[in-house]
Image (cartoon, rainbow, N blue to C red):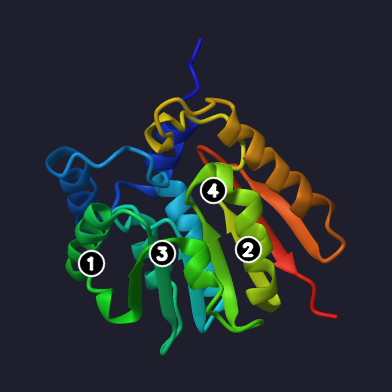
Amino acid sequence: MTTAPSPAGYVRSVLGPRDPVLDTVLRRSLLDDRMPTIQVDDNAGRVLQILTLLRRPRHVVEIGTLFGYSTIHLARGLPEGGRITTLEIDPAAAEVARRNLEEAGVSDRVDLVVGDAADHLATLAPASVGLVFIDGDKKSYPQYLKHCYPLLEPGGLLIADDAFAHGDFSPEQADGADPDREAHAIRTYARAVGRSPNLFSAFVGTEHGLLVSVKEQW
């Protein structure tokens, strides 16, 4: 009896290995810089790049840079003149990300902001963002939705990672945090976008799930 390959193994066998730049960025960040292994998986990165290529946003906002792995994919999908604002609260992670963005040749189209995401989101003009990718503090997903929805232009995309709410979020928890709080917040976010009359949403079956929503255009 033939055993079917795992989904991740099948994806790799069909799409081939990650390109050398991404491989270097990933290995160095995880092994040398000891960054937590909470970056998007390779297929999720490809989905982000495809969605950016299709939407062609002039301005992308990313919440949660980490070491820039998803940022690189988003930047590779930008149209000419497009820019990404990526928000990271950890200065050490931001420094690793700056180096990786330079290594990948996309730093010229990325503005990396270090600080609280909500503070920066409050400075952006309504309907000025074509795509938002949420991959920051999980327990803040409902708050991110409140901040980001008004920023989206009609037809804009709102994408959330870890949408299946079954991952290990311990690297993102403070001491004494409720281990179920992050999963509850993600489910609250998912129900809100899934039932909103102003968003059309669907799950994408990546390793931890992407939830993709498009804002109404009427």
Q: Which mark is residue 87?
A: 3
Residue tagged 4: 161
Distance Cα–Cα, label 4 vs label 1: 22 Å
| Residue 129 as seen in the image, left or right of residue 63 | right
**In the image, which is nearer the foreground, mark 4 or mark 3?**
3
> Quadrant of residue 115 in the image?
bottom left
**What amino acid does circle 3 point to?**
Leu
Q: CA distance from mark 1 to mark 3?
A: 18 Å
* Mark sitting earlier along the chain (2/3): 3
Q: Is residue 20 above or below residue 118?
A: above
Q: What distance separates the C-alpha of mark 4 from that of mark 3?
A: 15 Å
Question: In this view, which residue lies farthest toward the top?
Answer: 1
Instruction: Identify the secondary structure beneath mark 1.
Output: loop
Q: Amino acid at mark 1?
A: Ala
- Kind of element beneath mark 3: strand
CB within 8 Å, label 2 to label 4: no
Q: Which mark is residue 104?
A: 1
